[in-house]
Image (cartoon, grey):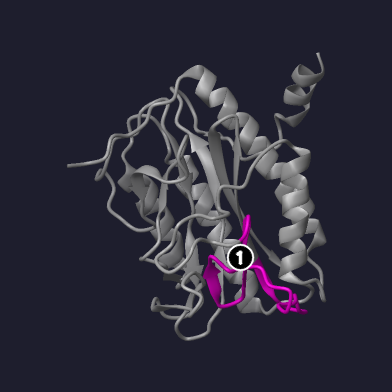
Amino acid sequence: MKAMISIKKDSDIEKMRRAGCIAADILDVVCAAVKVGVSTLALEQLTVAELDRHGATGPCYDYPGTSCPFPAHICVSINEEIVHGIPRKDRFIGEGDLVSLDLVVCRDGFMADSTRTVAIGEISAGKKKLLRITERALHAGIEKAIAGNRVGDISYAIEKCARKGKLGIVRELVGHGIGRDMHEAPSIPNWGERGEGERLVPGMTIAIEPMFMLGAEDIRVADDGWTISTADGECAAHFEHTVLITKKSPEILTTNKMSFLLRARDNA
């Protein structure tokens, strides 16, 4: 039996817009702090301070896992680490690194999920290609997030970018619905066939998140039970937005374009 897809009403969507703006604002701050010599724990501490400042929470913290709950509010994954990197005081950012920052924000009972991968200093041509194509795939998927289309249309657009760029696709991890819960139906794979999967309807909110690799598609899970890396040690990149399906074009919720309006309402 398939899980029910949650269709959000207008008041729910407004709360998700607010959570999305906060996620964008926090990622702006954290991305600016990613520099050579900074520990990943320092990025976690900055995230906590920003969540507090915005009156929001980070539902990644204490999220249940197979071995232990996730012990941080943001995932910081470096180079071959694809997702779920645990911030540590002895893990430092280095020149030429790719750093993925995956943040979920909850405000007023609704969540938004966003990820950015940033480059530190000079990086190789291969890493530049990886970043460019993975981010391009995110927007190709968003362009297909139109009412009347199906999940497979998003998945096919993402996979097409990977194939054209000769990049590996992470198949064990997928995008997902999001709202009151971090992970809701439907699943949004990064590969698929056009015209297949659940139909997209107005009011659906989904997290689209391509994860590509420079090398083979095999992965490994670290002893911490959370950090997922490429098996061959090649670099990975990850980009993600929370998107609202509307009657017209898709709306990216994890953007701070609405921040000024929302703050004005708060101060009115």
Q: Main secondary structure of the magenta part?
A: loop
Q: Which residues are magenta?
A: 72-99
Image quarter hosting the C terminus: top right
Q: Determine which residue is flagged by label 1.
A: 131
Image quarter hosting the N terminus: top left
Label 1 amino acid? Leu
Q: Eyeballing the image, is 91 above or below 174?
A: below
Choose between 182 and 198: the one closer to the eye. 182
Q: Residue 85 lies in magenta, yes or no?
A: yes
Residue 252 picture location, percent across and down = 57, 37
Residue 81 picture location, percent across and down = 55, 74
Choose between 45 and 68: the one closer to the eye. 68
Mark 1 residue crowding within 10 angstroms, few (<14) / some (14–19) / many (20+): many
The tally of labels here is 1
Choose between 17 and 249: the one closer to the eye. 17
Residue 214 picture location, percent across and down = 51, 77
Q: Eyeballing the image, is 150 above or below 124?
A: above
Q: Residue 247 lies in magenta, yes or no?
A: no
Q: Secondary structure at mark 1?
A: helix
